[in-house]
Image (cartoon, rainbow, N blue to C red):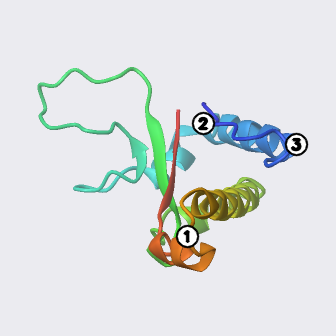
């Protein structure tokens, strides 16, 4: 799992550790439990192989779990709401922290470009946040 550290003071180290433990716990679930999160036909979100275009294609040895976390209205009802607690709560908290960081970056970008921060925020208001875990 890779994390992009913008600034250590912006993301709580304890939360990053909770996410790492949650991901590890998710992948250690029994197969029957993990199968509930499999990708559906024609979708990339869920547990499985990304970018499979044919039955003859060589696949990675490891599955990945890809999920859209923001905007919340775009979340797949069979994925995020069904994640085990406390992993779901941890991802929710992590998502909110990343959203806050994005807003801080927008303000800094606006200042650098001599823009009104409100205008910059409006440009990215409907931004998406997704997470890929493997």
Mark identifier at residue 46: none
Q: Earlier in the sequence, mark 3 or mark 2?
A: 3
Quadrant of the rendering where the N terminus is positioned: top right
Of badges 1 and 3, nearer the viewer stands 1
Residue 88 image-quadrant placement: bottom right
**Element assignment for label 3:** helix
Q: Are marks 1 and 2 in contact (CB under 8 Å)?
A: no
Q: CA distance from mark 1 to mark 2?
A: 44 Å
Residue 7 image position (x, y, % from top left):
76, 40
Q: CA distance from mark 1 to mark 3?
A: 35 Å
Mark identifier at residue 27: 2
**Element assignment for label 1:** loop
Q: Mark 1 — residue? A: 115
| Left or right of 14 on screen, residue 21 | left
Residue count near mark 3 (Cα–Cα under 10 Å), binned few <14, some 14–19, many ≥20: few
As drawn, the residue found furthest toward the front would be: 114
| Left or right of 113 on screen, residue 17 | right
Residue 40 image-quadrant placement: bottom left
Mark identifier at residue 14: 3
Query: Residue at coordinates 45% horizontally, 68% vertically from top-left?
Result: 76
């Amino acid at each position: 799992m890779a994390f992009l550290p913008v600034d250590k003071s912006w993301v709580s180290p304890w939360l990053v550790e909770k996410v790492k433990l949650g991901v590890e716990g998710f992948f250690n679930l029994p197969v029957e439990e993990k199968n509930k999160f499999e990708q559906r036909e024609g979708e990339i979100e869920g547990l499985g192989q990304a970018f499979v275009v044919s039955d003859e294609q060589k696949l990675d040895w490891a599955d990945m779990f890809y999920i859209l976390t923001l905007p919340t209205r775009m979340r797949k009802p069979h994925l995020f709401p069904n994640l085990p607690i406390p992993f779901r709560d941890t991802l929710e908290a992590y998502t909110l922290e990343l959203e806050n960081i994005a807003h801080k970056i927008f303000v800094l970008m606006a200042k650098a470009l001599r823009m009104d921060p409100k205008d910059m925020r409006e440009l990215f208001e409907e931004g998406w946040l997704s997470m890929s875990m493997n």
